[in-house]
Image (cartoon, rainbow, N blue to C red):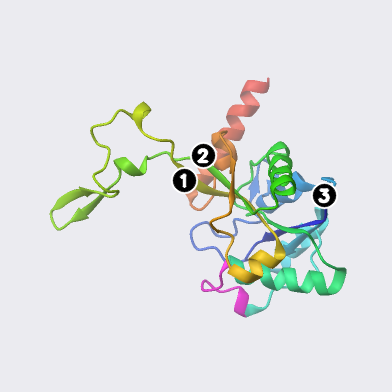
Amino acid sequence: MKILALIAARGGSKRVPGKNVRLLGGNPLIVWSINVVKEIPDICDILVSTDDANIADIARRAGAFVPWLRPSELASDLASSVDVSLHALDWYEDARGKVDGLLLLQPTSPFRSRETVVRGIELFRVNHRSVLGVSPALSHPMWCLHIDGKSIRPFVGSGGMHQRSQDLPPAYVLNGAFYLIEPGELRKQRSFYGDAAMPLIIDEPAESIDIDTEWDWKIAEALLALNAAESK
């Protein structure tokens, strides 16, 4: 199987400035996602799509393939991950041949494990369906509310306010750590999400961290410090 790993990393970040090159545990954030897929046999290349020369240099030194800087129209707040993915996929297949799958790895999910990546690829290989990383929902949707004027109402149907947590059906959320899809399917539906998508269930909380704020960054640093202390 031939899978292209794609890491999309813009230079601009309003909530955590410079986060893709900011050091986490001694490595720039983007390097965590590069390292996790190195030497996985099914990965034909690790392509980094960025508009930032500094990110590009760091990614190259880490062993990623950075053939160009992303066009400015794909580096704005309005550019979607699908647009960025299709741009990279089209270029790669024109330059280096067809691939069986596109694996999108968000650099903001630094703690996904190699074992999880390999497990997701195997799901894709066996079932020939797109695979999305999901984790147990921290807040069950049947316990969520919306505000209606000055009142609160259950967000889902009649809600489950009177049910014990152990009696609620399992609920999951996309965690952003893993998206794997066939190129033709991505071009057809212009989305990583579809009715036929399979879940890659990731139970380990650390693997599901998605660094989007300074608070998320502090949690990531605290986890690293805790792991270091426990290993002594």
The amino acid pointed to by label 1 is: Trp
Disc number for residue 215: 1
Q: Are marks 1 and 2 in contact (CB under 8 Å)?
A: yes
Residue 147's image quarter? Answer: bottom left
> Mark 3 vs mark 1: which is more N-terminal?
3
Give the foreground label among 3 and 2.
3
Give the foreground label among 3 and 1.
3
* Residue at image mark 3: 42
Pinpoint residue 192: horizontal percent, then vertical percent: 59, 60
Question: In the drawing, does residue 124 fall left or right of residue 174?
Answer: right
Q: Residue at x 30, y 48 (%)?
A: 156
The amino acid pointed to by label 3 is: Asp
> Mark 3 vs mark 2: which is more N-terminal?
3
Q: Please report the bounds of the magenta region as a residue range.
A: 73-80
The amino acid pointed to by label 2 is: Ile
**Residue 188 position (above or below residue 161):** below
Question: In the drawing, does residue 9 fall left or right of residue 163?
Answer: right
The answer to if 78 sits in the magenta stretch is yes
Disc number for residue 10: none
